[in-house]
Image (cartoon, helix red, strand yellow):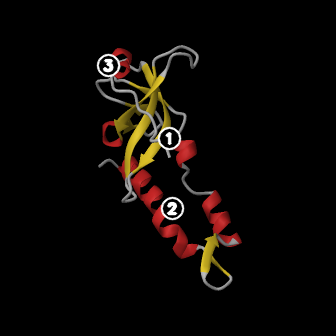
Amino acid sequence: MNTQKFIIASAISFGLLGGAAYAQPVAGTTTLGASATEVQAIATGWSLKDAILGKTVHNEADESVGKIEDVIIAPDGTVSFAILSVGGFLGMGSHDVAIPLKNLRAAGDGKITLPGATKDALKELPKFEYAKK
């Protein structure tokens, strides 16, 4: 696993699984949120929204092949898939596909690549739809 993916998985796992351990008690028994000191530290930390969500994904030829719309977290707390919006033009006619996070590569400059991807190949993948709740 490359370093950035490890950081992503760790940050998400910590945020989901470890957050309650740092939260403040409410009414003596329930934990609800972070303290003011913790909020200051959190504000300067790594952000999934800033680092991943909304980023354009490129192939090795530096062609844009999609945009990361979401990251799916498995029930065990691990990051499993990135949901990419592919196809279409100006948001019209696009659809979402699930890409295993292990297939994405992050460069030091923040660029995200999906080796071997083409727009046509991604458009042919099964459409991802969220489960109805």
Q: Label 2, on which residue?
A: 15
Could you tell me how far apart the alpha carbons at marks 3 and 1 are, in whole angstroms?
Answer: 22 Å
Q: Label 3, on which residue?
A: 121
Instruction: Return the disc, 2 or 1, that comes first in the chain's sequence.
Output: 2
- Say which residue appears at 52% left-offset and 33% top-offset: 55
Q: Label 1, on which residue?
A: 52
Q: Nearer the viewer, residue 20 or 128?
A: 128
The answer to whether residue 84 of the structure is visible from this angle is yes
Say whether residue 74 is left or right of residue 32.
left
> Closer to us: mark 2 or mark 1?
2
Whether 50 is drawn above or below 12: the answer is above
Could you tell me how far apart the alpha carbons at marks 2 and 3 are, in whole angstroms?
Answer: 34 Å
Instruction: Return the disc, 2 or 3, that comes first in the chain's sequence.
Output: 2
Residue 127: image x %, image y %? Answer: 39, 27
Q: Which residue is outermost to the right?
A: 36
Name which residue type carries label 1. Ile
Name which residue type carries label 2. Gly
Residue 19: image x %, image y %? Answer: 53, 68
- Say which residue appears at 41% left-offset and 39% top-offset: 82
Whether 39 is drawn above or below 28: the answer is above
